[in-house]
Amino acid sequence: MPPMTAAIPSDSSATAPAGNRVSARVGSISESATLAVDAKAKALKAAGRPVIGFGAGEPDFPTPDYIVEAAVEACRNPKFHRYTPAGGLPELKAAIADKTLRDSGYRVEAANVLVTNGGKQAIYEAFAAMLDPGDEVIVPAPYWTTYPESIKLAGGVPVPVVADETTGYQVSVEQLEAARTERTKVLLFVSPSNPTGAVYPREQVEAVGRWAAERGLWVMTDEIYEHLVYGDAEFSSLPVVVPELADRCVIVNGVAKTYAMTGWRVGWVIGPKDIVKAATNLQSHATSNVSNVAQAAALAAVSGDLTAVEQMKESFDRRRRTIVRMLNEIDGVVCPEPEGAFYAYPSVKALLGKEIRGQRPADSVELAALILEEAEVAVVPGEAFGTPGYLRLSYALGDEDLVEGVSRLQKLLAEARD
């Protein structure tokens, strides 16, 4: 008698009631729109199509050599072949504390630091440590696509507060107060911003911080683009500007953007010791320690100077000015000049409903799909960031590709007709 075998049914819906196979908690989480656009662009490119991708938010530069060499040496060191503390290598936590004082003037101890598998894990674990079911988090929009999903996964409720191009994508204290309820526990504050590149001036950072402090709110602030600011804009760390908020403030950061290390997956949480300890306990069960090799590379990065990022900034600044100029040359497109990060976030609301190549895109999702198919340019629609009617374009790509890609947009969108 042959052995009994089992197989996964080709149509699982035929064998189980709908909705029972995947938990509601995880089933409600959306795919990362930015990664999905990047994956589609790469797949089309692999199939031979000359797609230019403005989707992924990662520098096009290699990780600096001295950082790579530190990783090579770590591979050869047997002490890194074993488990290490779940919260991070002690020497890396100390170096992150030193780097934080050096770069933003914020004094913390190693015990205030948790090293995570990239910024996304830092964000989720921090929210998980702060939120109970039903707690509300005020989320200025446009927001990075991962924020609301992390909040929901942690049991919280994201409450968007929308700003647009007329205010440089900066929310006001009055808007924040209007969104506050008795369930509000946390304010998310991001400057420089992904996806808009907005950088709040110091006086606005202070106003927002004092508002949160006076109302007893927690603040999570994402500082991963702290070094990527241009022109007269300046980065201001919220707990430095408003010291009385420090005991209710959590910072997330990482090496990805500053040192062109997106694939190394090293981020961190800085916060009050009780929150950091709780998040560390969570990580001890979820993933244990971050890869020791990647941690050794991060140690070299944060312990070194900022020469590499200064060189990248020169290129980003040049591309920033080019992409804004070229986008604003398109009828129906309005693109404020971003002051930080490496994204442009133009409004395309005036183009929606117009005929382009026989189609009338009703929203920015349909417009982005049309642009990919007809111009072979990958952009991310504003729906992914909580504000339909916009597109996000990362200018962290080569100068020639940038000009070619936006030129294709200019040519395609010039065909728009009523």
Image (spheres, rainbow, N blue to C red):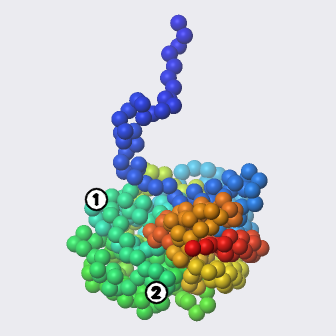
Q: Point out residue 299 in the picture as x, y percentages from the top left corner.
A: 61, 68
Q: Residue furthest top?
A: 1
Q: As displayed, is residue 109 above or below residue 43?
A: below
Relative placement, left or right, of 98 versus 412 is left
The kind of residue on which mark 2 rests is: Thr
Name the residue nearer the viewer: 74 or 310: 310
Against 14, is 386 above or below? Answer: below
- Residue receiving disc 1: 133
State the residue at coordinates (40%, 50%).
Answer: 26
- In this view of the protein, which residue sits in the foreground, 220 or 162? 162
Q: How many numbered discs?
A: 2
Separation of residues labelled 2 and 1 (CA atoms): 33 Å
Query: Residue 142: image x %, image y %?
Result: 46, 73
> Residue drawn at (38%, 62%), measured in percent from left and top?
151
Q: Residue at x 47, y 63 (%)?
A: 146
Residue shown at 68%/56% (left/top)?
A: 42
Label 2: few (<14), some or many (≥20) within 10 Å? few
Residue 241 is marked as none
Residue 182, by quadrant, is bottom left
Task: Residue 202: give x, y in percent of width and height.
Answer: 46, 90
Q: What is the quadrant of the C terminus in the image? A: bottom right
Left/right of residue 293 with respect to residue 141 in the rendered view? right
Q: Which residue is mark 2?
A: 167
State the residue in front, 339 or 168.
Answer: 168
* Residue 167 percent coordinates (x, y): 46, 86
Up-down relation of residue 413 to residue 321 (above or below): above
